[in-house]
Amino acid sequence: MFISSWGRVTHHKTAIISDEENKSHSYLTVGNLRSYGDQPYSSKTKQNLLNNKIIAFNDVGGWIEAESGALLQDIRSVVISYGFDLIVVPGTSLVTIGGAISNDIHGKSHHIHGSFGNTLISIKVSIDNKIKTCSPVRNAGLFKAVIAGMGLIGEIISAKIKVTKTNKLNYEVDSFTFNKIDDFYRLAKKSYDYSDSVAWFDCKKSRGIFFRGKRTDRQIKSSLKSNFSYPFNQKFSLINSLTTALFNRLYYFRHFFFPANKKLLSHESFHHPLDKILGWNKVYGSKGFYQFQCVIPEAYEKEGIESIMAAIRKSKQGSFLSVLKKFGPIKSLGYLSFPLCGTTLAIDFPNLGIKTTRLMDELYLIVQGYNGRIYPAKDALMSERQFKISFPNFKKFMRYRTKNIISEMSKRYNI
Amino acid sequence: MKKKILIIGATSTIAHECARSFTSKYQCSFTLIARNQSELDKNKSDLLIRSKNANVKTIPLNSFDLRSIKSLNSKLTNPYDIYILAHGILIENDNLTMDKLSEANELNINSYANLIFLIYESMKKINKGHLVLFGSVAGDRGRQSNFWYGASKGYIHKVFQGIEHDIAIHNRNLNVSIVKPGPTLTKMTMHLSNAYKFSKVSDVAKEIVKEIDLKKRVIYSPGRWRWIMLIIILLPRFIFNKLKI
């Protein structure tokens, strides 16, 4: 059967194996297919979404242990019922625990809490049919390889995740418009003690909106739970320069004239606004889209981000989904973890063929020039050379690499 | 509200998802029965953590073994509100061998019938309870792609009709339903080439539990399969025989 990753630029023919069949370890385990490029593609695939049981919950120690196919959304609803909450959540709650570990995902609270790997107590992983437990103290090397290991070490069976005791489930959000990149950094610095912060950015006009949030126990009266699925499968992208320009203006001026001031938002609408529309990736049409996400180290962050934006502006491509975020100094644990202390920028580009890949190549070169990194979870185009330069710990990773698990991405990176 | 629920084949994906769905509505006391004790233990802790006031008991059962089935009898003296029989294996006509067929029939027909017999007899004595059988849309009309599996599910449909008639004639205070899930993504079907088009098990289970609550007789889930199967049943042979379904 054919599977496609979230970007839908390519589709891949694969054989899905069942739980019982074939225990010789030559398959790649995938979760909810939320990575963008060729990371989940291989000739033999195991889907682990149905391995979603909760194994244990400990309210004294503050942790939950669950099978790797459980979605973060599901886990969160369970820990909330005990008066706890997850510590690190990404922009979508529709990722599995296995996927969150394998990409060492991050969220709006990175500057305070680090990435998902920093909240793990231990991981059980099946390598060549043997189950091994690893943690920061036990099999620590394996632990660092599995975190952000892109599924190439083995099949993650389950994980023990730290949770935090809190009854503050919603957010009080402030918004500020800015029209200089300096202002973004000034706002980020000023808001450092806010648990969550992120900015939306309009590359063409060089202006944006800075959001910061604090947890609150204020209750939301009625939360409309929409479960809308994007119903079309049209050929063309609804996101083009016209709709983007229109949306960007509306969005900017809405916050310019009516900035949020301690506005009460639910966890879902603050952290996962796009989860309200299931299958939103189809908005980009059947050719799909690329996402560019990089991080530039703190030393050159302003310069780096500015030259990336200049290149994007020149290309006249892009969409309204562009996000700027300051990463903090907490070290990510995985050998191939993406976050660095610095600034991350993420932008979607509708796939216009060679025009878009050329732009991506150009952006990738700029990132490399500033000693930055491309996020493999979003990547479909990085070369072996760039990967190996920007993730120098790959050599340590290779010590734990299970050679017979092969994905299209591992072929591209030659790891 | 409290509910006592017995589930045979409790480690099947749909059955476990139904159990989760019940816990979100009621204070449940489950008896989970299946072959694999370690899988049962996992399901037990999953339900207990998800629902603080649930109560779960597990019983391992080898449903290929008549003695093992008979030994269950002593555990059925306490009445349950709902009895769910969800065990079974899927076979496809492609690459079918006689060994596979005979194993599947042993489980899907013989053992299933024995368990219905055992449970229905005890229900009659207590004169209380709701029996939920698992059929399949495959059992509605024999089709070239899966008629061996379909036939075993058709057998269950006939038993369902018989029990329904028996309850009516003898005016028993019992209910019986048959669940016919449409193609659903479960551990049993995930390797099939078109599995990505199948319904999500959590949606299917939610609908099943809702319909069980309403004491519906024939439960198609998702509901649209009632109408799809109606059309397939009513298709004249000269058309049906031209369709490769």
Image (spheres, rainbow, N blue to C red):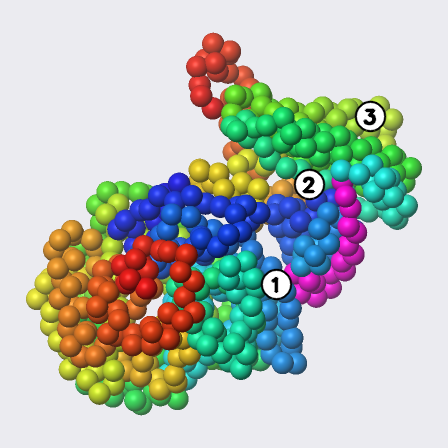
Q: Quadrant of the N terminus of chain A?
A: top left
CA separation in Å, label 1 and label 2? 22 Å
In front: A254, or A235?
A235
- Give the residue displayed 66% in from the left and 65% down from the top: B49
Q: Quadrant of the C terminus of chain A?
A: bottom left
Label number found at residue B179: none
Say whether mark 3 and mark 2 are on the same chain: yes
CA separation in Å, label 3 and label 1? 42 Å
Q: Which residue is mark 2?
A: B86
Image quadrant in which you'd find residue A366: bottom left
Identify the residue at the far left of this view.
Answer: A314
Label number found at residue B166: 3
Q: Which residue is mark 1?
A: A54
As displayed, is residue B1 above or below residue B234? below
Q: Which residues are magenta?
A: B45-63
Image quadrant in which you'd find residue A159: bottom right
Say whether mark 1 and mark 3 are on the same chain: no
Q: Secondary structure at mark 3?
A: helix
Q: Answer with left or right where residue B40 lies relative to residue B189.
A: right
Q: Does the residue at mark 3 contact the one at mark 1 (Cβ under 8 Å)?
A: no
